[in-house]
Each structure stands twice: as C-alpha cells, then as structure tokens.
Amino acid sequence: MRRIILTAGTIVAAAMLVAILVPRMSPANGAASPDQWKIHDRNRPMAPVITPGECSTPDHAGQPPSDAVILFDGHDLSKWRAADGGPAKWKVGNGYFETTPGTGDMSTRDIFGDCQLHVEWATPNPPHGEDQDRGNSGVYLQSLYEVQVLDSYQSKTYADGQAAAIYGQYPPLVNACRPPGEWQTYDIIFHGPRFDASGNVTRAAFITVIQNGVLVQDHVRIMGPTEHMRRPPYRQTPEKLPLKLQDHNHPVRYRNIWIRALGPEGLPSV
C-alpha cells in the first residue's frame, strides 16, 4: 500500500481550498455566515418587504403583520380542531373564543416549526379559585413545550407554574400580569429541537417570551417536553407540529392569534 504523508503545509493548503470552495455555514442554524459578504455589498439580498401590524388596545384586537398566518381572526375556529381530530368545541364570542371546560385541548390544523407567535388571553373576572385552580390554560409550542397561562395577579403558586413560566422548568424573570379580565399578550420566539438520524439531540429547543411588552423568558434552553411533576427527555419529533391550547377546566379567553414561520437565518419563510 502506498503511504500518503501530509505535511503541515499540505494540510493548511487543503483547509484554505475548502474554505474557498465550500460556503461558510453557521453552526447555529446552517445558514450562510454574514462574513461571506463584503461590508455594504450591494449584491447582498435585501430583506422582504412586509406591512407591519398594529398593536391591540384593551377593547380592540390589533392587526397582524402582512406575512403572518392568522390562526384566529375573531370569527370562527376553522383553523383549529379538537383533540379527537373533529371540529373545535370551544365557544366563540364577540371577537374572542373561550375554553369550554371539559371539551379537551384544541390544536391547529396546520403544523409549525421555528416561529414568532402572538397570543392574547384573558382570565375570568371575577376570579375563582387559587393557586393552579385560577384561570389556568397553556400555550404549547409543537404541542409539547408549554408557556403557562394562569391568573397570577396577586395570586401565589409555585414559581415554575405561574403565568409566563416554561412549565416545570423556568419561572418568568418578573411577574408582568395584568388584573383578571384584562387582555394580556404573549409574543413568543421559538426555535424547535433538531435530531440526527439516530434520534440524538443535535440542537435543543430555545424560547423567548415577552409578556405585555416585558421580557420574561430570555432565550432559555428547554430541557425537554414540559409535563406536570416530570421532566422527560427529548424524543425524536418532526420539525413541524401543531400548536396546542390547553383546556384546564377554566373559561380562559383568547383573541388575535397569529404566527410567522422563521427561516434558517431567523427571517420569515417566503
């Protein structure tokens, strides 16, 4: 067998050739690295043009950005289905829908992966119950990772179960809740997990949550699916799954729900 001897100079030259021929890739998201472009390179693609949305008021739901997928427009639940796959069973009111206790969770008919999600919710007024038995629901990214919905206004519960907690994992940085009956907003940035062919985690899920304009979860690393009294490990799942809202036997209201898919560089998929 013929022996091949690689000198340091040969290795360096080979590495330089690979660097020239192979586009630089960002290990975080597989996208082309910004340093492949010259500074102020006029050939660099421009960002897509969209129409930004409008903020909500206490009495009026805002307008989603033009590239968002509207999951609830105030009129019907055609974008949703019940846990058994049938028509959604929650009550639709004037510009909102409300959990119908005992009917089960509700999921989107479409599937989503990395995303920007906007959700507005309000707990019952006057409030009923205490601790976890007080305006309880939840927003589940990919049906697995819960951002807690709860009446946590002057109401005590365990820290990783209050409103805006990543349930069972991370309490919010601050309690930014409004009084019961008032509309509250979650703006969520979610990057789902990735797996190799053997089911090993190559990238954990990360989530950022802004509640009522206040940062409450700062790009935290999700440990795995969120469950009550358990922290199960990741299991291999598709990159896109339905969004789920939880029926926890409380008449929590929702409105103005929209979602924007995020591409490999954190930009909307077009």
Image (cartoon, rainbow, N blue to C red):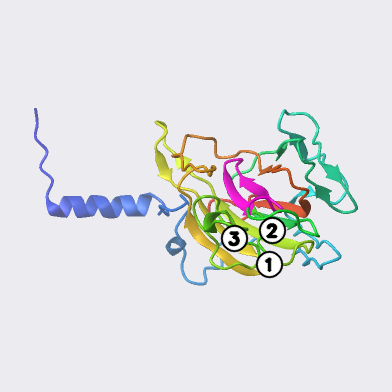
- Mark 1 or mark 2: name the one nearer the start of the chain: 2
Classify mark 3: helix, strand or loop. strand
Circle on res. 50: none
In the picture as drawn, the residue positioned furthest to the front comes out as 129
Q: Amino acid at mark 1?
A: Asn
Classify mark 2: helix, strand or loop. loop
Q: Which residue is mark 3?
A: 209
Circle on res. 151: 2
Q: Amino acid at mark 2?
A: Asp
Residue range in magenta is 132-148
Circle on res. 212: 1
What's the residue at 49%, 52% (across, down)?
169
Residue 115 visible: no
Is 232 or 209 nearer to us in this picture?
232
Q: Amino acid at mark 3?
A: Val
What's the residue at 50%, 56% (across, down)?
170
